[in-house]
Image (cartoon, helix red, strand yellow):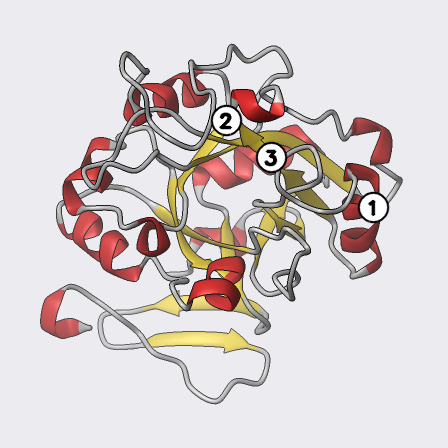
Amino acid sequence: MQDPTFTAPGRFWRGNLHTHSNRSDGVLPPKEVCHRYREEGYDFIALTDHFIGEYDYPIVDTRPFRTEGFTTILGAEVHSGAMENGELWHILAVGLPLDFAPPNSPGFQPIDGMETGPELAMRCREAGAFVAVAHPEWGGLSLQDARSLTAAHAVEIYNHGCQVGADRAEGFWHLDRLLEEGRALTLCATDDAHFTEPDHFGGWVMVKSESNEPEALLRALKTGSYYSSQGPEINNIEVSAKHVVVNCSSVATVIVQGKGSAA
């Protein structure tokens, strides 16, 4: 059996789903962020500035920075409500409309009467967004927190900014627990670039789509027609009763993981 991602029509497009500009706590203007990713060979990015009142709830309109070979998806990193550790939720929402209604989230601290993180995530999904659990290891996300985010399509499996800045890059533990419980989730690698340190061009998704257009890319992301990478290119995966055959660029090791001791 072939993985359906590799039999789907179209080709792979390289993109970053988690990026910040000076519209929130990044240092570069949106136009320059888009320019740098385009020059690095990316086909698309989502600029996902922090959707809080301190920054005037930005969903940055990056449509003017699209070119013939490069596109953008509108989105944000949204925040509302407290996790079990008392800190504010961080949720990645890629594909939000410009008029998405903000929560009551004035800053990076939870306040009384806020919409919960899971409620906000569900609003994002219902508005058409691809929703991901952002940097669960870095944020101290509990298993119950992760379970409660039922709107999520994916878990950030690798966050390059969290690796560079805090050595807390991964989402494997949370993803494994949720998969064991029967959740249908995919895994996305991202940069979370702020350009304050070498936090860019370190993790990305390769999305299989017939066109490099925002709606087509979003459909593919939501159906799981993509893979994540920090470098290797995957051409095909075939699974049989006894073997997994991976056709890819040169790598040192291929590891197949499963539930529990099958890992």
Residue, disc 1: 32
Vertical placement of residue 136 versus 252, above or below? above
Eye-nearest disc, 2 or 3: 3
Tell me residue 60's x, y (percent): 69, 27
Q: Nearer the viewer, residue 249 or 4?
A: 249
Q: Amino acid at mark 1?
A: Glu
Q: Amino acid at mark 3?
A: Asp
Q: Residue at x 62, y 53 (%)?
A: 193
Tell me residue 20's x, y (percent): 63, 43
Left or right: 220 with respect to 166? right
Callout 3 environment at 10 Å: few (<14), some (14 to 19), or many (20+)? many
Vertical placement of residue 55 versus 16, above or below? above
Left or right: 215 with respect to 174? right
Q: Residue at x 76, y 53 (%)?
A: 37
Q: Name which of mark 2 and mark 3 comes first in the sequence.
A: 3
Residue 129's tag is: 2
Q: Amino acid at mark 2?
A: Ala
Q: CA distance from mark 2 to mark 1?
A: 24 Å
> Would residue 109 be visible to someone looking at this image?
yes
Per the image, label 1 sits on a secondary structure element best described as helix
Which quadrant holds residue 120? top left
Q: CA distance from mark 2 to mark 3?
A: 15 Å
Per the image, label 3 sits on a secondary structure element best described as loop
> Which quadrant would the C terminus be assigned to in this image?
bottom left
Which quadrant holds residue 62? top right
> Would residue 94 be visible to someone looking at this image?
no
Q: CA distance from mark 3 to mark 1?
A: 14 Å
Residue, disc 3: 49
Q: Name which of mark 3 and mark 1 comes first in the sequence.
A: 1
